[in-house]
Image (cartoon, grey):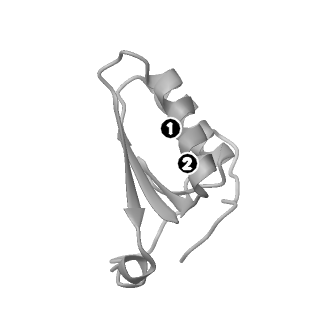
């Protein structure tokens, strides 16, 4: 199943750790606070455990939305998608949809 993961995290260090975790799961960085990619149910459950461990009792927020194939195919992209990186060195995403 394909998932869209978005987050609202004000702490810079925590935000970087969350982004690195999402990247480690093979998800593509498609917006400043958004990743997308396919995960099996066991990997999704593992990701949720990892994110809960990172977020802890903070007020930060991560949301995970399942995207069916029809919904994903029906998406509208306005403008040119950007490539994002987690640090100063440019990295090519492992997954590219555009």
Task: Give the image location of residue 17, x and y in percent.
Answer: 57, 30
Residue under label 2, please give it.
Answer: 44
The front one of 16 and 27 is: 27
Where 23 sits versus 58, above or below? below
Q: Residue at x 65, y 48 (%)?
A: 25
Q: Residue at x 61, y 38 (%)?
A: 20
The front one of 52 and 88 is: 52
**Residue farthest top in this picture:** 57
Where 11 sits versus 82, above or below? above
**Residue farthest front in this picture:** 42
State the image quarter where residue 95 is shown. Answer: bottom right
Taking the image as drawn, is residue 35 in sight?
yes
Left or right side of 69 for 16: right
Left or right side of 4 for 43: right
Q: Residues within 10 Å of mark 2 (few under 14, many from 20)?
A: some
Mark 2–mark 1 Cα distance, whole angstroms, equals 6 Å
Q: Residue at x 40, y 61 (%)?
A: 66
Element class at badge 1: helix
Marks counted in the figure total 2
Left or right side of 97 for 65: left
Element class at badge 2: helix
Task: Give the image location of residue 79, x and y in percent.
Answer: 37, 76
Residue 11 has which mark? Answer: none
Task: Give the image location of residue 45, x and y in percent.
Answer: 55, 42
Residue 48 has which mark? Answer: 1
Contact, mark 2 vs mark 1 (Cβ under 8 Å): yes
Task: Give the image location of residue 54, x and y in percent.
Answer: 51, 23
Taking the image as drawn, is residue 85 in sight?
no
């Amino acid at each position: 199943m394909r998932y869209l993961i978005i987050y609202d995290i004000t702490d810079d260090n925590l935000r970087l750790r969350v982004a690195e975790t999402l990247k480690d799961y093979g998800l593509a960085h498609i917006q400043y606070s958004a990743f997308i990619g396919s995960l099996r149910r066991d990997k999704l459950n593992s990701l949720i455990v990892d994110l809960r461990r990172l977020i802890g009792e903070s007020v930060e927020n991560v949301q995970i939305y399942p995207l069916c194939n029809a919904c994903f195919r029906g998406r509208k992209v306005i403008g040119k998608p950007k490539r994002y990186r987690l640090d100063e060195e440019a990295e090519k995403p492992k997954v590219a949809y555009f």
